[in-house]
Amino acid sequence: MSLLQELPSIVSSSAKRVGRGYGSQRGGHTAGRGQKGQLSRTGASKVALWFEGGQLPLIKRLPMLRGKARFGSLKTKQEVQLRDVVAKGLTEITVESLAEANLIRLSNGTPRLIGAVKLETPVTVTGIETSNPVRKAIEKAGGKVTQ
């Protein structure tokens, strides 16, 4: 028995290099580019991603919206439940105190208190938008809301 028979067998073969010439049985004169067309030509294969073949482009088919008001919907509000604020034990509620309690992120937009619950202790809210039921619940408990 020779030493070559004791060598471990190679289980996986390496990936085959695919040539594009005539002798590779793949391609030939088209070399994997298909038959004819804009993408098969040399030097002219840079077509913009949004190009639709001469059809009226999407940006021109959509209605033109004038002014800056169309960006108003991009201003997001972070909704914070009042029960979460009460569970953290906050009595002075500001944007900074909500951020310190990990209830909001300062970079994600303005906070808004929602979800009225019955309060036992008075709470002071400063500089945060509140829904009407939350405002009534805070004032009923003896707290106050200031914008």
Image: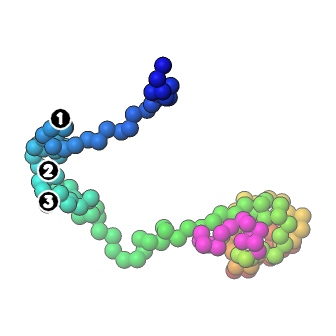
In front: label 1 or label 3: 1
Q: Which residue is mark 1?
A: 25
Residue under the point 14% across and 59% down: 44
Label 1 residue SS: loop
Q: Quadrant of residue 45?
A: bottom left
Looking at the image, which is closer to me, 104 or 83? 104
Magenta extent: 97-110
Q: Which residue is mark 2?
A: 40
Residue under the point 20% across and 59% down: 47
Could you tell which of marks 1 and 2 lies nearer the N-terminus? Answer: 1
In front: label 1 or label 2: 1
Amino acid type, mark 1: Gln
CB of mark 3 within 8 Å of CB of mark 2? no
In this view, which residue lies farthest toward the right?
Answer: 120
Whole-percent x, y for residue 143 in the image: 84, 74
In this view, which residue lies farthest toward the front?
Answer: 2
Looking at the image, which is closer to me, 9 or 78? 9
